[in-house]
Image (spheres, rainbow, N blue to C red):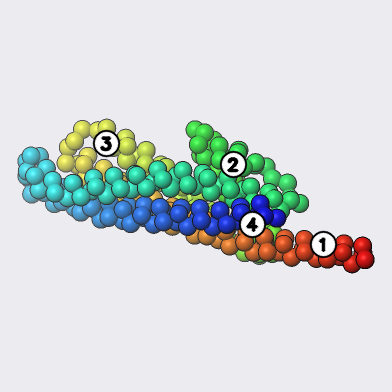
Amino acid sequence: MHKKIYQYSDLTSLTRWLGLSLVVCILSSLFAFFFEGFLFFQFVSMKGQGLAQTDLWVNVEGTTIYLQGSVFVRNIFFFVAAILSLKWIYRAFTNAKSFGGIESRFSPNTAVLSFVVPLINLCAPFGVVKELWGISSYFSGNTFLHKRSYLPTAWWASYLVTICLFYLSYLGGLKSATPVDLAVGHLTACAFNLSFIVLSLCFLKLTGQVLLKQTLAYGETVSVEACQIEEQGVLAA
């Protein structure tokens, strides 16, 4: 029993640090979204005025520095959040499987690997999150919310959209640096940042809900174990 208490205490702390990292990612992505949007309109308006390409770069140089700073902060905390997310998935699955009684297609290790193995991470993570959500909901007695919840699906949709926009933004950066290409690239980057914000918000909400469900489920498990111990004591007497 002490091991389970340690696990849930550890998951609470881990969820808190993960949430803090996601909040920083959201804020830095929000700044990047506004800077990318500003640069997009700058390139469009200056192209319409017929300015030379050197003049375009001079006018947006300051904004570009702020944009690079926002992206740097986001990338650093995204790396931190990614490591904490994998650890959170492992810990949450370990706790969910400790309840027993429901067969799972994933082990804690395979759940983590589904996020990092190329190609597999394009389809398997949805099954992992959905199963984790379902098991946690079932043992917390929240089966109705499990059936009607939008969070796993919303997270999965934003996950796929964010990946697609990331690759589109990357491919756009390989093109020639004409004003039109730059404007399209900044517009794509705006969409990516917005999608990343939605993805982070969904995962932030999802981790908090799973933690709450598992905490409730753990309370029920402790109550059942206490009743069984009490019954065994009465029978022994």
| Residue at the image point whose x is 7% and y is 39% from the top | 54
Disc 3 marks a residue whose amino acid type is: Gly
Disc 4 marks a residue whose amino acid type is: Ile
| Residue at the image point whose x is 27% and y is 55% from the top | 31
| Mark before the other along the chain sequence, 1 or 3 | 3
**Disc on res. 173:** 3
The relative height of residue 216 versus residue 3 in the rendered view (above or below) is: below
Compute the Cα span from label 1 to label 3. Answer: 65 Å
Residue 208: in sight, yes or no?
yes
| Mark before the other along the chain sequence, 3 or 2 | 2
Q: Nearer the viewer, mark 1 or mark 3?
A: 1
Under circle 1, the secondary element is: helix
Residue 126: in sight, yes or no?
no
| Mark before the other along the chain sequence, 2 or 1 | 2
| Residue at the image point whose x is 37% and y is 41% from the top | 166
Q: Nearer the viewer, mark 3 or mark 4?
A: 4
Compute the Cα span from label 3 to label 2. Answer: 33 Å
